[in-house]
Image (cartoon, rainbow, N blue to C red):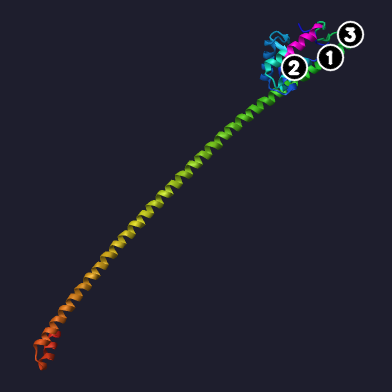
């Protein structure tokens, strides 16, 4: 049993001890297990550890040690055993809640009326808090619904925009392909026309060459006086 606890000494829960030392609550439990494994004694309420100021110092020592935790825990346990040798067993002092009550019935009545009023006020506050909580839940539910509606609208708008873009892109591609086909047809038509012109020109050149040959042959066959007549006869044909 712990015999080094002072009267009216403050007790800490595991959470409060963690806040006091500046470590996490699971770390406090871990330190407690290491200390108990090496023989350290905690004040307990059932299986729950109750920490006092000296225990806070022990947790700080484990937090700041550079040695293995078990070695430090053994040193702390030895120190605790030395300290408990000369200590007398005491308990955390709890004040009697009834020792300071007045004996005058009128004063007791006033206290009771005060307590009744406080309880009524507390109930009213609780009712108001319950109502506020209900309204808050309703408001949160509405916000969630509005968020869902807004998200759905955004998704629908985005889908519509994507559909429009895809449609415009398809129309643009179709228009481009149509223009490309038209240009291709125009190019083919121009090539045909150019080829026709070349063929006509070639025919004209051939015809002109044949004419020139006939003219030259006619001139060579005719006598000098008859050359002009023959020449004229060629043009008359």
Name above or below for residue 81 compared with residue 236.
above
Q: Secondary structure at mark 2?
A: helix
Q: Position of residue 224 (x, y in %)?
A: 11, 93
The residue labelled by disc 1 is: 113
Q: Quadrant of the C terminus?
A: bottom left
Of callouts 3 and 1, which one flags the residue occurring earlier in the amino acid sequence?
3
Is residue 169 found inside the magenta-colored segment of the image? no
Residue at image location 55% in from the left, 34% down from the top = 148
Badge 2 crowding class, 10 Å Cα cut-off, few under 14, some 14 to 19, many 20 or more, is some
Residue at 59% from the left image edge and 31% from the top image edge: 144
Instruction: Classify residue 235 as left or right of residue 113.
Output: left
Residue 209, percent across and down?
A: 17, 78
Task: Decide which of 27, 215 is in the foreground and name it.
Answer: 27
| Mark positioned earlier in the residue sequence (1 or 2) | 2
Q: Position of residue 187 (x, y in %)?
A: 31, 62
**Residue tagged 2:** 58
For this rendering, which residue is in front, 224 or 96?
A: 224
Closer to us: 86 or 17: 86
The boundaries of the magenta stretch are: 75-85
Give the class, few, some or many, for how many residues have Cα within 10 Å of label 3's Cα (few <14, many ≥20). Answer: few
Residue situated in front as seen by the camera: 200 or 28 = 28
- Mark 3 highlights which residue? 105
Left or right: 133 as drawn, with respect to 188: right
Question: Which residue is rendered at x = 86% and y = 11% of the image?
Answer: 109
- Of badges 3 and 2, the one in the foreground is 2
Please report the residue visible at 70 percent of the width from the left and 13 percent of the height from the top: 35
Q: x, y percentage for residue 132? A: 69, 26
Q: Nearer the viewer, mark 1 or mark 2?
A: 2
Earlier sequence position, callout 3 versus callout 2: 2
Location of residue 21 with respect to 112 vertically, above or below: below
Q: Quadrant of the N terminus?
A: top right
Does residue 211 appear left or right of residue 37 in this picture?
Answer: left
């Amino acid at each position: 049993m712990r015999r080094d606890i002072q009267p009216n000494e403050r007790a800490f829960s595991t959470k409060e001890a963690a806040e006091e030392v500046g470590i996490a609550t699971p770390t406090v439990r871990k330190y407690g297990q290491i200390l108990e494994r090496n023989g350290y004694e905690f004040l307990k309420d059932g299986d729950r550890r109750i920490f006092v100021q000296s225990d806070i110092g022990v947790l700080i020592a484990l937090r700041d040690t550079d040695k293995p935790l078990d070695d430090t825990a053994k040193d702390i346990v030895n120190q605790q055993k030395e300290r408990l040798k000369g200590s007398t067993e005491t308990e955390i002092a709890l004040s009697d809640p009834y020792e300071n009550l007045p004996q005058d019935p009128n004063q007791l009545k006033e206290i009771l009326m005060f307590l009744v009023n406080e309880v009524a006020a507390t109930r009213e506050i609780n009712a108001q808090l319950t109502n506020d909580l209900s309204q808050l839940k309703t408001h949160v539910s509405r916000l969630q619904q509005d968020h869902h509606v807004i998200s759905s609208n955004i998704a629908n708008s985005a889908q519509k925009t994507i559909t429009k873009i895809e449609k415009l892109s398809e129309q643009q591609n179709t228009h481009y392909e149509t223009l490309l086909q038209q240009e291709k047809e125009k190019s083919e038509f121009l090539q045909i026309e150019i080829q026709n012109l070349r063929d006509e020109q070639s025919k004209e050149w051939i015809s002109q060459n044949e004419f020139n040959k006939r003219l030259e042959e006619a001139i060579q066959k005719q006598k000098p006086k008859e050359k002009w007549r023959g020449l004229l006869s060629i043009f008359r044909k």
